[in-house]
Amino acid sequence: MAFQKAVKGTALVGGGALATVLGLSQFAHYRRKQLNLTSVEAADCFSDVQLKELPSREAQLTSLQSTTEFDILVIGGGATGAGCALDAVTRGLRTALVERDDFSSGTSSRSTKLIHGGVRYLQKAISNLDYEQYRMVKEALHERANLLEIAPHLSHPLPIMLPIYKWWHLPYYWVGIKLYDLVAGVHCLKSSYVLSKSKALEHFPMLQKDKLVGAIVYYDGQHNDARMNLAIALTAARYGAAIANYVEVRNLLKKKDPQTGKLRVSGARCRDVLTGHEFEVRAKCVINATGPFTDTLRKMDNQTTPNICQPSAGVHIVMPGYYSPESMGLLDPATSDGRVIFFLPWEKMTIAGTTDSPTDITSHPIPSEEDINFILSEVRNYLSCDVEVRRGDVLAAWSGIRPLVTDPTSKDTQSISRNHVVDTSESGLITIAGGKWTTYRSMAEDTIDTAIKNHKFKAGPSRTSGLYLQGGKDWSPTLYIRLVQDYGLESEVAQHLASTYGDKAFEVAKIASVTGKRWPIVGVRLVSEFPYIEAEVKYGIKEYACTAVDMISRRTRLAFLNVQAAEEALPKIVDLMGRELNWSEEKKKEELDCATSFLYYEMGYKSRSEQLTYCSEISLQPADIERYKKRFHMFDKEQKGFITIVDVQRVLESVNIQMNQNTLHEILNEVDLNKNGLVELNEFLQLMSAIQKGMVSGSRLAVLMKTAEESLGSRSPIPVDRSCGGFACYLHGIVQGCRDGKQPAHKELRS
């Protein structure tokens, strides 16, 4: 205790002095910001009137084609592009935005889900005396507070624990975290604090306790990144911006400047990806906000222009929620290769990442098995040996490409600052590149300031600081209770709707389907273990969802939470979208195939399924092999060497279990490696071997066969009048739970 007090005293003096010096350097900047905000509030030329109904995508396309000339055309619908559109339209500028794919389809939906200043960037700023890094951290901390304020339904403060395993690390990290608080100033979410070893384990019981000294807890923000991006774009649309997804730029339009005689960018020739129709969008100013594809558009303007972006890939994985506490994250500040790993609760699951490595630019980044295993290895280092960290527990994985601003001679992407750059080409194309999710608003402000200066637009200062995003203005923490009481939604669904749509949740509840049950009255789920309901598909189309991929990955987050659950929900989602959009059977099949491919390659389903392959090694003890053969032959009575759906049904019926054929087909298909409709003995032994090694978890067939064996071997057949409330419900529950990413009650059932 005395040591801790001494550390705090010394650190406070030293840290306070340094923070004072740094803080004074920014005081004038802060005062200018405050005065600017005051002038914004006093401005009477801005109309805070939003459209009650979002224009349809067709109406937006008509506006893009019929408007003679926009003031601003933004290319790119990620966080920065949507932020530019919102900033421009709220200054009174005629604004358009086009996105080649869906809003937030790229990097903006594949982040760590944090709204943060960057603890590691502050560390680099101090150790390298880098004022630019420091300025970026301070700006990000201001923007963090603003984002939590303008979208309270989509964001919240999150405590993050930094475990300490060496005594001398405690004062070092404590000073750094306290400086983080001090740099945030009035925008500090909550003050950081030190925990003893026992208190750290109380808050994070699955933490590795050997050699643990204590922990430091600090606060950052967390959000639903894709929904946040969408909220920014929809808010811009409600203020009058013409925005459209699935519109690609084929080439830039140029015209001669009568004063200088030089060619100036004057718009873009666009193509509706869904219909193939081409049209022109004229604009006085064109903004390139295409993230990793920044240089592609710059070269469309001028083939000789040098690259200014160096892409970096960041992989994340999602694991079951029991890997972390519900409201406490973890930071590994120094992994085995010097990178930083976050381990965070998110949407009742656990997200871990990220890696940081150079990559090629692609529209469809794929998480590598190497990166997934690296993250799992680092997670094992910080979790108790009582927690078996298994490859089979990875429910989803994805890779995002960060558009880092770089010196072309630099090869180390980790040393590159996330500072943004606003550049104007000779022809007038404005490019905004670099930066980070948290600072999207200030990046957009700087970009529109440049556009106003270059084109002498009559517009005032930015009005987006403190401007509520769609759903945020009338949201409250108790809003979900009204949804339960007024519409008869179950509490979990109501909380989900409130935290996803904010005050627009009532619009979703109004179109929710009746369940036909006593409770809940409305709200038919897309898949049993997640609170997403059918009404969200209908509402998602109003939010410009055009494909099944849009729905499973960005309107809902199913693909990012559990790829198997997303795959299960796909047929229902495609059917619902087909009804609303009048899809033919051929179109439905195309959408189903496309979404399945997306899950397989981009969301980690391929890596997950490859843990059990036809050539997987069987590494079992002879006694285990005999035990599993005996279990297999309980189903394969005729000694055929394989089991079918009929065999499984027969055994289940002997213990009075009814399971529909589609479900049984799904269960067998998970293990049927050569896809011949049968599960052969060798395939079953490969499955059990993979389970023992932790490469596969939650196999429904393994649990079903184990449980049925126990019942047949130790109990007489269960009476029909008990089956509903006894073993039948028990078996159904664990089989369902395994598919959901939950685990059986004890380890023996998993073997």
Image (tube, rainbow, N blue to C red):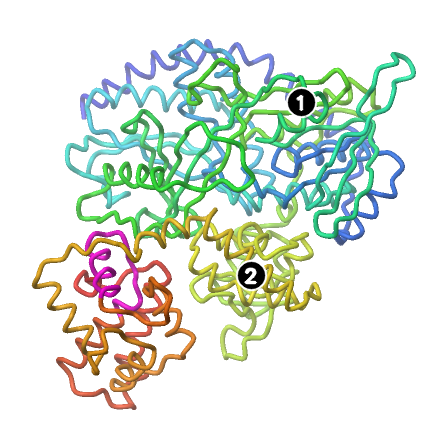
Residue neighbourhood size for the residue with mark 2, other residues' Cα within 10 Å, grouped as few (<14), some (14–19), many (≥20): many
Q: Is residue 499 left or right of residue 203?
A: right
Nearer the camera: disc 1 or disc 2: 2
655 or 666: nearer the eye? 666
Q: Tell which of 21 and 553 is nearer to you.
A: 553
Q: Residues within 10 Å of mark 1 (few under 14, many from 20)?
A: some
Nearer to the camera, 204 or 650: 650
Give the Cα separation between the discs numbered 1 and 2: 41 Å
Label 2: which residue?
Answer: 592
User: Label 1 amino acid?
Assistant: Asp
Can you tell which quarter of the image residue 179 is in? top left
Residue 556's place in the image compared with 114, above or below, is: below
The magenta segment is 682-703
Q: Is residue 442 visible?
A: no
Inspect this view and state whether residue 555 appears. yes
Q: Residue at x 23, y 52 (%)?
A: 694
Q: State which tag comes first along the sequence, 1 or 2.
A: 1
Question: In the drawing, does residue 110 fall left or right of residue 304?
Answer: left
Q: Position of residue 508 (x, y in %)?
A: 63, 61
Residue 296 point in image, percent of width and height: 64, 28
